[in-house]
Image (cartoon, rainbow, N blue to C red):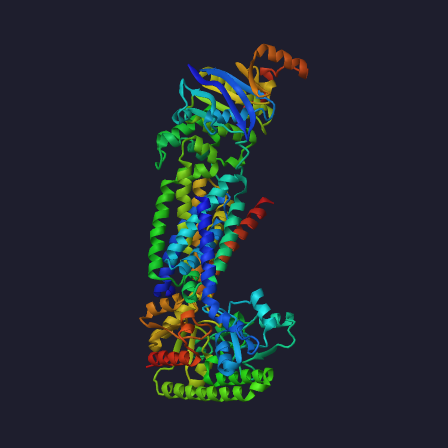
Amino acid sequence: MALFEYEFMRRAFIVGLLLAVIIPCIGVVVVLKRLTMIGDALSHSSLAGVAAGLVMGVNPILGAGVTCVVAALGIETIRKKMPQYSDIAIAVVLSSSIGMAGVLSGFVKNAANFNSFLFGSIVAFSDFEMTLVVCVSFAVMLAFVLLYKELFFIAFDERAARLAGVPVGMVNNIFTVLTAITVSIASRTVGVLIVSSMMVIPVACAMQLRASYKRTVIYSVCFAVAFTAAGLYVSYYARLKPGGTIVLLGVACLILILSAKKLLKF
Amino acid sequence: MKRFCMTLWVCVAALVLLEGWGGYSPVMGAVNENKSQKLSVLASFYPMYDFAVKIGGERVSVTNMVPAGMEPHDWEPAAADIAELEKAAVFVYNGAGMEHWVSDVLGVLQNRALITVEASKGIKLLEGHHHESHEDEHEDEHEDEEHDHEHEDEVHDPHVWLSPVYAKAELENIKNALVQADPEGKSYYEANYEKYAAECDALDKEFTNILAPLPKKDIVVTHQAFGYICERYGLRQVPIEGLSPDSEPDPGRMAEIIDFVKEHGVKVIFFEELASPKVAETIAKATGAATDMLSPMEGLGEEEIASGIDYFAVMRRNLKSLAAALQ
Amino acid sequence: MCVVRVENLGFSYGGEPVFSQVSFAVRKGDFVVVIGANGAGKSTLFRLILGELASPKGKIRLFGDDSRPRERRAIGYLPQNGSLANGDFPATVEEIVMSNLFLQIGFLRFPKKEHREKVRESLERVGMAAFAKRLIGDLSGGQRQRVMLARALVSDPELLMLDEPTSGVDLPSIVSMFELLSRMNGTQGITVMMITHDVDNILEYASRVLCLEKGSLVELEKTQFIEELSHKHKHPARSREGAKRHGSF
């Protein structure tokens, strides 16, 4: 195929598909714990981190990673205090991140530098970013497989998991840190849009199929992989923005599933 | 732990605020001191600021509304900026769609004495086509339609100041406004205008002399800002993006540019100071070309301004980069 | 052997005493019903025994020993409204029951054949083996409650603690669930502690009745209590025959 003649397209497929595997895995747990907007909140906190890093003269990727982890642990802490209203935690972190990113960005002296961290596109990223994505992907895959039954138990019934002896605090913290790192790196590399939507849309599609937890995870990954591959393919030939194309394909698929379900019922 | 984090953030924010104020004080200070004698001029972004300083000289105090290092395409005035406008005597902006906020803001201003200058007035504007310079070569009509569509609300290319000839025209518009606001300084402004108009002519000659004999004519740029340079000196720009920088490129377009670069032996992919160089780097990597900066002068970094660089210095730097790329 | 021994236990919530000087012992094979008005502290008492709450006043000993966390794993627990929450969660009955085998499988390890076998056994015990592959959301309230019971039973608990297992469950299911518990209590020697408001139905299965009232706990004589109840409600406890007719799954 013509599009694979270009290295940037091959790289886009590699990174896109890796992220399409790991982000929905995180997404399943996040959605089932009713923390759907966490991707958005964390990607904005990583913007604040980039700005803070540039202002303070610290490596911006490090800054983004640190603020993301702090924000994620902050969400986790507030969530523990108000378990029924975890969206409050996300709203607080999201708005404070946007505020902080806005204020701090006014003091960034070299805007080019700032913009290059804000800007992420699946068709343009550096070798360094690609290496980071590959490393993070394998770390997340490993953690997700090893912590599979623990994450399921906690997502389904955190209290029962604790009573059954699951080290809930530790598992939650590992998961939170991994989520934060994934979001901060992936949103720098492929853009905020893809990251926050890949966390939710494939999972929403998979949940419509009403399958077991295991199948829901597998279907989510399949949906995400399909959206990413199709999105890249379509955007290449139809000359569209890849990030938006991937997201819209996902939304279209969700609408299709919902209406198909409705039609079949009647 | 939580409290500690909070405190840390507050400290960081406070430090940053202080530092920020410290950094901006030279510019701000210029407005405040000798307010009574000097004509207060607000300029919408860097080239307008530089032109107003050149014409107004000692008789005016000019403030650049877009802070150093900010991308003016995305910038919008804050309440404090509107307050400054209420106090100013002259407001210089480029127009031609560069400052989308101007008509709204001018509509609400109560400062009836304010003289506004649309510096690009009277200049024959280029259509804001996505890639007008080479589509006749290898693009079908279908694509052309599509891209027309994409930039419906940005029909004109606003980057007129990048042509020395039009820079001269903008200087003249600014001069006329200053004369209107401060008739006593007429001869002073006229003299400044003559001086810099001559320098524009000289710059124009340098561009023609250096660029005309060079064998290559194609420049690949991240953002379609160099239409007026190309028009004047017979170059063709191949923009990766449209008139606004920092939107995501589509992969089909990138593939096309990679093919173009290979086919025409383009040696340098240009990026600009205020936008991400990632796309330029990706294309450079795929084709073995180098990357270099070509400034559309939408804003300069703080260090650059502090080092006393001006319009002519940046244009000569651009000329050098162009000459190297087109060898 | 005492499965649970509580001595002089007191608990206050935000300065307000919930109860004080609570002492009782549950022996192996007991079927204890805990009753009391709303807010009397029944669930709090359970949470103290489970180790989710701690109190500086008094002592709780489990299985004849000090209450070390490890001992708590021998408790199977059915939370209040546990079956109603997470109704749309994409998980099968099997997956949910399997989750409680955490300690048997081990941290970071995967279930083996023997664990799947245990899950099947546990589902058979509550009569839900045929529903192993079904989604929890597709089941009725009574069926879900049985799944939760299977989840509690899968780790072979010596003590089963149930917090209002009958809320949101229809009458036939309630009765058949009580029968099931009674059978396990009688034949398998599982000690049962249950909080319930459904006194009418439970009393014929229970061996002891504990009542939390006005901040203290008293043990009621069962026979005396049944008489009192029948006077109050003008109808006796439901007959076993009726239950059998309606409550077979």
Q: Up-down: is C184 above or below B318?
A: above
x and y percentages locating residue B185 in the rendered image:
56, 86
Q: Quadrant of residue C60?
A: top left
Q: Looking at the image, which residue sits at the far left? A: B288
How many numbered marks have been drawn onto this rendered protein structure? 0
Residue at the spot 47% in from the left edge and 87% down from the top edge? B197
Question: Is A226 situated left or right of B127 in this image?
Answer: left
Q: Does residue A84 appear to the left or right of C95 in the view shown?
A: right
Q: Quadrant of residue C16?
A: top right
Question: Relative to B194, is A258 above or below?
Answer: above
Q: Residue B11, how many percent across, how many down? A: 45, 53
Residue ID at (40%, 35%): A167
> In the picture, which quadrant includes the C terminus of chain A?
top right
Front one among A49 and B177: B177
Residue C249 visible here: no
Give the x, y percent position of residue B88.
Answer: 58, 74
| Residue in the foreground of this view, choosing between C139 and A132 | A132
- Percent x, y of residue B237: 42, 78
In-image side of B321 versus C202 (left or right): left
B220 or A183, nearer to the observer: A183
Would you place residue B186 above or below residue C166 in this image?
A: below
Q: Nearer the viewer, residue A185 or B51?
A: B51
| Quadrant (top left/top right/bottom left/bottom right) for the N terminus of chain A | bottom left
Residue B201 appears in the figure: yes
Q: Which corner quadrant of the image does residue B238 belong to?
A: bottom left
